[in-house]
Image: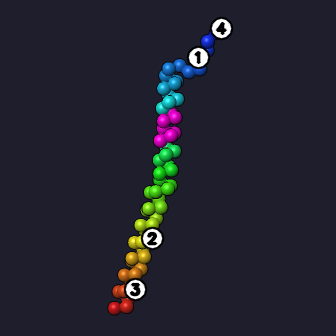
Amino acid sequence: MILTVMFDFDQYLGFLAFLTILTIGFWLMIFLLTFVIPYWIGGAFIERMKEIKEAKKAKRQ
């Protein structure tokens, strides 16, 4: 029976590095889309509302 090797050791390490980078990128994208971007948009919206409120207050006086 002939035993065939699917990967050499350096190819195996490269494959593991690829999977690691892919997984890190996936979870980073999930984190950005679910937390960072909505937080950023929400904060910008709140700041804009404060500016509009202050402009109306200054216009009234």
Q: Can you identify the residue that label 3 sits on? A: 56
Q: Can you identify the residue that label 2 sits on? A: 45
Magenta region, mostly helix, strand or loop? helix
User: Disc 1 on helix, strand or loop?
Assistant: loop
Q: CA distance from mark 4 to mark 1?
A: 13 Å
Q: Can you identify the residue that label 4 sits on? A: 1
Nearest-to-viewer mark from 3 and 4: 4
Q: CA distance from mark 2 to mark 4?
A: 69 Å
Nearest-to-viewer mark from 3 and 1: 1
Amino acid type, callout 3: Lys
Q: Quadrant of the N terminus?
A: top right
* x and y, in percent, of residue 15 in the image: 52, 29
* x and y, in percent, of residue 59 in the image: 38, 88
Q: Can you identify the residue that label 1 sits on? A: 5
Badge 3 density bin: few <14, some 14–19, many ≥20, Cα 10 Å: few
Q: CA distance from mark 1 to mark 2?
A: 57 Å
Looking at the image, tell me whether mark 3 or mark 2 is earlier in sequence order.
2
Looking at the image, tell me whether mark 1 or mark 2 is earlier in sequence order.
1
Task: Check the image and report above or below for 20 versus 27.
Answer: above
Task: Check the image and report above or below for 27 versus 34.
Answer: above
* x and y, in percent, of residue 18 in the image: 51, 34
Looking at the image, tell me whether mark 2 or mark 4 is earlier in sequence order.
4
* x and y, in percent, of residue 46 in the image: 42, 71
Looking at the image, tell me whether mark 3 or mark 4 is earlier in sequence order.
4
